[in-house]
RNA sequence: GCCGGGAUGGCGGAAUUGGCAGACGCGUUGGACUUAGGAUCCAAUGCCCAAAAGGCGUGCAGGUUCAAGUCCUGUUCCCGGCACCA
């Protein structure tokens, strides 16, 4: 095909000055805070789009930019589609880094935090994100955290907040509690790398998340708008497992009970020992009179803890100690030895198991090592009744078998046996069917300063007393000395610590623990709907209007904790009549990480790309466009410095295309008659409608905005190639107008600027999203590939309405096709209308 | 070990339903304009072959089909999550 001579594009005169343009719109938007405000009441349908609120660490990183670029594009798209959009932003502003900064930079946590917020907020504004700042939520403000305290009191009232002893990481040199992330190198203090962290038992506050275990699991089925990956992760995290609780009796005069949990009660006749976790309460009793045992157990505990901290508990060598005592199997009265083993977890089930080496891999390993008896009680079911049953290879762990050597239960299948044997246990009163969960109650106590004070008092006379609701908020004092040693800094603030008991009026001491910051983020999105309410956390009617969140967007790293806690909180609020929805989030989108040079961006690797630098070098639009263009949003994005150059070029070419003749475009009314268009002009119009279709469908479907941006590039390429639109001012204007509308969600600064150059005085943000005409989008001619024996031999162009017969005729007449058929016979002719022709020859 | 996700040119990625593999962008090469170009524009660009003709190509090995990146069986590697959960 002959290549047409292309006129060089006149672009030199109209270079796009992203800075000038973006600063101009930045100023204008700043002067009108109502621009992005959600309407309190509206006849429009509502849409609540939310991105996860950031921790104000100092500055935005590219992961934030990507997250917010996705959400902002959606918000703008929904505005243009006539929705009443709620698109808020806030700050997850309590947390440990502020205290660290207090030490290293000698800035009070509050000041450091607020400074960071100011900086990051400015960055967000400079990037052009359309947030309703009138609803900004800052979790470290008393106006917000007083409601954390209020919720805590409600939870306490309902018995869902309680105190129990629990282990914490304790550094003897710091004389303080460490967060998990401060325990490094498999058990050492982050500040004293030669000091082993100890485990100390402290009284801590817990929230009864397990109260909702079943509902949290069940309702995952009602969240089809969540990624399957996240639902699976939550399912595993909750870890529901049906089984049987069986009580063995200690072989002693008092006959203390040892409850074990098993999912395979059908194998209990094969139990040849009982295994206890090293931290099992019975262990201390057994060891009390046995110093040697005590020492051995302590050794096991240390091993287990080290392995856990090093993250390889599944890898450690199994160790155990025989206590010399026995437990009685209630099914057959048999006495089996009691062992203590490092692979038994106190945190799951009852912390004790029956060990059946023949039918459990772990028990098998352990029994082999210590010479414990192995007794086969399940035989595989033969495929055919004639077949003789051979002894299976051990351990034989499948459920597809028949019980043997199991007394009255012999001959049953595993499934039947589990039913019957559980019923038997219940009848005899030594056991029952039960469900175990991996999910634990949520420990919210933090021995930290920078967090929400837990609103509880300790009175010498009345014990634990909740702060009366009317005395909220319990204000976190500002004047404290952060040392990171010697416990909570709040202990050093007498005016905080010392108070009076609301019951007896006597002296009382305040709780100095503060709340886990996951509390803050468990309900913040409700506060956005009614951010300034000082009588309640929010107004229920307002929440009922906005909830559930239509679209939540954030990193997959929050798939478990944040999102389970949020679901828990919602269910609790529903149960106390505060909200009506069972779930907070209807649709969830988890975006991929931003990586560079094959690794996650990090200071230590020196591969960090700073948003500020990108904005100053290329502009906010380019940074946003590139973060959408470089990869589909759900996949990891490999940042390439040369890639954003290409985007800047695109932005410049768009601008040049509009400026080429903007006077004419501005004054045209944009009306043209389709019948009068030249074929080339019709082709552009077709491309326009195809582009509208592609971009609209990306929003409705997979969110592959990389292809949306690519579609816009293709449209621009067609518009500028061969000066195709030169002769038709009206069409040119019409195409430009729709182009701006399509560009608006992705590159708001440029789009607004171009909108203005077109002479549009209305607000682009509320301009209607363009509709496509399927007729105009339809191709008039089709390229039909011709294959012979599945191999491409030629391509012909036919009218879109060509019949099968016409296409086949053309195909058979094609010279190249003829040559490949040669003298052979055509045995099959496949004509797929609109797609291809394949001739099978022999 | 279990559960997800992935593997496509030199690179990021397209190809939602089996129907022209490589859209779009980067990079590279050649050219135009230019005092100059690391600006801008034009063109070429999966690999093999001097070129044409042709052949080969979506991690690997098979299979189904007129036709496979796409479906099936097996397998390797990479990323993420969970992990002695009884």
Image (tube, rainbow, N blue to C red):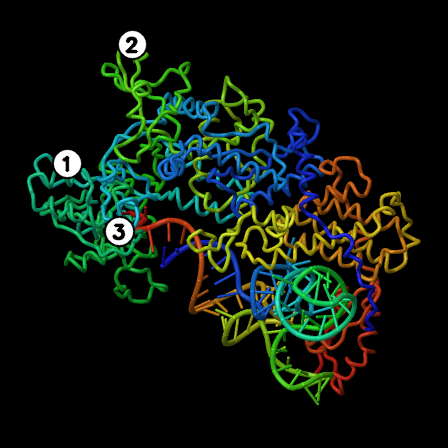
Q: Residue B83: horizontal and vertical position, in percent?
A: 33, 50
Q: Secondary structure at mark 2?
A: loop
Res. A24 image quadrant: top right
Residue lying at 14% horizontally and 39% vertically, measured from the top left: A284
Q: Are marks 1 and 3 on the same chain?
A: yes
Same subunit, tags 3 and 2: yes
Q: Quadrant of the C terminus of chain A?
A: bottom right
Residue at the spot 24% in from the left edge and 47% down from the top edge: A305
Picture disc at residue A307 = 3
According to the picture, the residue beneath numbered tag 1 turns out to be A256
Looking at the image, residue A188 sits to the left or right of residue A798; the answer is: left
SS type, badge 1: loop
CA gap, disc 1 to disc 3? 31 Å
The answer to whether residue A327 is left or right of residue A709 is left
Q: Chain of mark 2?
A: A
- Marks 1 and 2, Cα distance to the nearest angstrom? 45 Å
Q: Residue at x 43, y 35 (%)?
A: A565
Q: Position of residue A455 (x, y in %)?
A: 36, 22
In the image, A131 versus A606, the foreground residue is: A606
Q: Residues within 10 Å of mark 1 (few under 14, many from 20)?
A: some
Say which residue label 2 marks.
Answer: A505
Q: Nearer the viewer, residue A588 or A493?
A: A493
């Amino acid at each position: 095909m002959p290549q047409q001579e292309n006129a060089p594009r006149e672009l030199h005169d109209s270079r796009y000055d992203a800075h000038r343009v973006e600063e101009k719109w930045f100023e204008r938007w700043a002067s009108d805070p109502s621009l992005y405000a959600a309407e309190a009441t509206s006849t429009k349908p509502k849409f609540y789009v939310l991105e996860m609120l950031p921790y104000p660490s100092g500055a935005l990183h590219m992961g934030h930019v990507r997250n917010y670029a996705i959400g902002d594009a959606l918000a703008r798209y929904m505005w243009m589609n006539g929705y009443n959009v709620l698109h808020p932003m806030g700050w997850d502003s309590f947390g440990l880094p502020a205290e660290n900064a207090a030490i290293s930079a000698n800035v009070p946590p509050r000041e450091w935090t607020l400074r960071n917020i100011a900086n990051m907020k400015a960055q967000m504004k400079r990037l052009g994100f359309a947030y309703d700042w009138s609803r900004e939520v800052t979790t470290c403000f008393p106006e917000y955290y007083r409601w954390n305290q209020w919720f805590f009191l409600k939870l306490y009232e309902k018995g869902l907040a309680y105190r129990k002893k629990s282990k914490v990481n304790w550094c003897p040199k710091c004389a303080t509690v460490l967060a998990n992330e401060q325990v490094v190198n498999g058990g050492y203090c982050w500040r004293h790398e030669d000091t082993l962290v100890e485990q100390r038992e402290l009284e801590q506050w817990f929230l009864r998340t397990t109260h909702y275990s079943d509902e949290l699991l069940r309702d995952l089925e009602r969240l089809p708008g969540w990624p399957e990956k996240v639902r699976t992760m939550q399912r595993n995290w909750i870890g529901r497992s049906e089984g049987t609780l069986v009580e063995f009796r200690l072989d002693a005069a008092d006959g203390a009970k040892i409850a074990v949990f098993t999912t395979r009660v059908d194998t209990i006749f094969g139990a040849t020992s009982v295994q206890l976790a090293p931290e099992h309460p019975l262990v201390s009793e057994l060891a009390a009179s046995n110093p040697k045992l005590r020492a051995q157990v302590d050794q096991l505990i240390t091993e287990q803890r080290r392995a856990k901290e090093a993250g390889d508990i599944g890898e450690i060598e199994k160790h155990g100690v025989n206590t010399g005592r026995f437990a009685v199997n209630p099914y057959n009265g048999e006495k089996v030895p009691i062992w203590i083993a490092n692979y038994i977890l106190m945190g799951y089930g009852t912390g004790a198991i029956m060990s059946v080496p023949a039918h459990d891999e772990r028990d098998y390993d352990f029994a082999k090592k210590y010479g414990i008896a192995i007794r086969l009680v399940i035989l595989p079911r033969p495929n055919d009744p004639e077949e003789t049953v051979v002894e299976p290879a051990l351990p034989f762990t499948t459920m597809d078998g028949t019980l043997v050597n199991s007394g009255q239960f012999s001959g049953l299948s595993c499934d039947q046996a589990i039913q019957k044997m559980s019923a038997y246990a219940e009848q005899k009163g030594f056991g029952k069917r039960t469900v175990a969960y991996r999910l634990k109650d949520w420990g919210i106590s933090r021995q930290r300063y920078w967090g929400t004070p837990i609103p509880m008092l300790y009175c010498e006379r009345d014990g634990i007393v909740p702060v009366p609701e009317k005395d909220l908020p319990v204000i976190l004092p500002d004047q404290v000395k952060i040392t990171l040693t010697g416990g909570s800094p709040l202990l050093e603030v007498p005016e905080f610590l010392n108070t009076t008991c609301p019951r007896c009026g006597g002296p009382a001491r305040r709780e100095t623990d503060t709340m886990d910051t996951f509390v803050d983020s468990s309900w913040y999105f409700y506060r956005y709907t009614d951010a300034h309410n000082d009588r309640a956390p929010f107004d229920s009617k307002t929440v009922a209007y906005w909830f559930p969140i239509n679209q939540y967007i954030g990193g997959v790293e929050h798939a478990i904790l944040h999102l389970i806690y949020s679901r828990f909180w919602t269910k609790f609020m529903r149960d106390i009549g505060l909200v009506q929805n069972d779930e907070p989030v209807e649709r969830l989108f988890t975006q991929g990480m931003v990586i560079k040079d094959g690794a996650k961006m990090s200071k230590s690797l020196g591969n960090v790309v700073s948003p500020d630098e990108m904005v100053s070098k290329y502009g906010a639009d380019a940074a946003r466009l590139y973060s959408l263009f470089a990869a589909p949003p759900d996949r990891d994005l490999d940042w390439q410095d040369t890639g954003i150059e290409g985007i800047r070029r695109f932005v410049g070419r768009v601008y040049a295309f509009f400026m080429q003749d903007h006077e004419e475009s501005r004054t045209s009314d944009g009306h043209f008659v389709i019948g009068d268009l030249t074929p080339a002009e019709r082709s552009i119009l077709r491309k326009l409608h195809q582009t509208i279709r592609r971009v609209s469908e990306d929003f409705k479907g997979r969110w592959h905005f990389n292809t949306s941006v690519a579609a816009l590039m293709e449209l621009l390429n067609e518009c500028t190639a061969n000066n195709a639109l030169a002769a038709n001012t009206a069409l040119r204007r019409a195409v430009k107008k729709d182009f701006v509308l399509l560009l608006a969600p992705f590159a708001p600064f440029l789009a607004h600027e171009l909108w203005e150059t077109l002479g549009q005085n209305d607000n682009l943000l509320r301009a209607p999203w363009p509709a496509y005409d399927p007729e105009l989008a339809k191709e008039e001619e089709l390229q039909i590939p011709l294959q012979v024996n599945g191999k491409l031999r030629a391509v012909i162009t036919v009218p879109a309405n060509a019949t099968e017969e016409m296409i086949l005729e053309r195909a058979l007449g094609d010279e190249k096709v003829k040559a490949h058929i040669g003298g052979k016979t055509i045995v099959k002719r496949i004509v797929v209308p609109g797609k291809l022709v394949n001739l099978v020859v022999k």
